[in-house]
Image (spheres, rainbow, N blue to C red):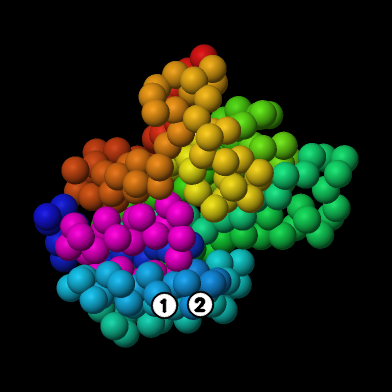
Amino acid sequence: MSRLTGKVAIITGAASGMGLSALQLFVAEGARVVATDISAEALRQAVDEVTANGGEAIARTHDVSSIEDWNRVVDDVLAEWGTIDILINNAGIALPKGILDAELEDWNKVMAINATGPWLGMKSVIPTMQAAGHGSIVNVSSIAGIIGGGAGDGGGAAYSASKGAVRSLTKHAAQWFAKDSIRVNSVHPGPIDTGLTRGYGFTKESLANPGTVPLPPHAGEASDVAYGLLYLASDEAKFITGTELVIDGGFISQ
């Protein structure tokens, strides 16, 4: 396959879940990928697997809330491959605590990773894309950035707020950098069976509820989101920016 041949991509949160699926798919489609994650050992294993199968990828341990880490990752990418065509801001955490239950420390941690992380990623990568005259950024938000409550945000106030911030920040960036031929879009997963949803206490069985998700098989898989990321990252989406791609089996259509 060759939908991303010649492209260099950074994918954050690539050691598991949707980020891992995106890593595997992007490499299969011809991209050279810098995979980053805070979980160094799991990330190394993921990258070793794709490179053993002939893909091009490198691993970098990365705290997305750290500007120093972002600068290091970008410097490493440019030293290795000379350009950055795609940024997938996927790294995120969940904390199922409401407004009254969460402490300030909880709020700040979720916002630092889920909202500040994508901002720092764009801040670090956009100058390289501007110099190249093109680029595609996809920020992973959530249906929690569109609706609130229930399975939408797992009861997490900071999670919901952070994903709403990513949604709005994406539109801001799309407007400001369209003149540079940099596209910025957001993806909004719904009930997807990943480590993040399991952290909320959901199982695949509890997610697979036909009463809340109209489209069988009712619970999405990480690959469903990865294919959405692939489309928005690729040149097939060359006339799309500032949009929201909801991948939720019809959850929020009700």
Q: Position of residue 115 (x, y in %)?
A: 60, 53
Name above or below for residue 53 compared with residue 194.
Answer: below
Q: Which mark is residue 44?
A: 1
Q: In this orientation, which residue lies closer to the viewer: 163 or 82?
A: 163
Task: Please tell me which residue is depicted at 72% across the width and 37% down the height of the picture.
Answer: 155
In the rendered image of this protein, does residue 132 appear above or below residue 228? Answer: below
Say what amino acid the circle numbered 2 marks. Ala
Image point (68%, 29%), residue name? 149
Q: 240 or 217: which is nearer to us?
A: 217
Please report the residue visible at 81 percent of the width from the left and 59 percent of the height from the top: 105
Q: Residue at x 41, y 77 (%)?
A: 44
- Residue found farthest to the bottom: 79
Q: Which mark is residue 40?
A: 2
Task: Locate residue 74 relative to residue 202 in the image: left or right.
Answer: left
Any part of residue 129 in sight:
no
User: What is the spatial separation of the Cα atoms under label 1 and label 2, in whole angstroms?
Assistant: 6 Å
Q: Is the Cβ of the residue at disc 1 closer than 8 Å to that at disc 2? A: yes
The spot of residue 250 in percent (x, y) is 44, 22
Q: What residue occupies the far top of the structure in this picture?
A: 254
Identified by mark 1, the residue type is Arg
Q: What span is colored magenta in the figure? A: 15-36
Residue 123 location, x and y as percent? 49, 63
Q: Quadrant of the N terminus?
A: bottom left
- Find out whether residue 25 is within the magenta segment: yes
CA neighbours of label 2 inside 10 A, class few (<14), some (14 to 19), many (20+): some
Q: How many marks?
A: 2
Against 146, residue 63 (above or below) is below
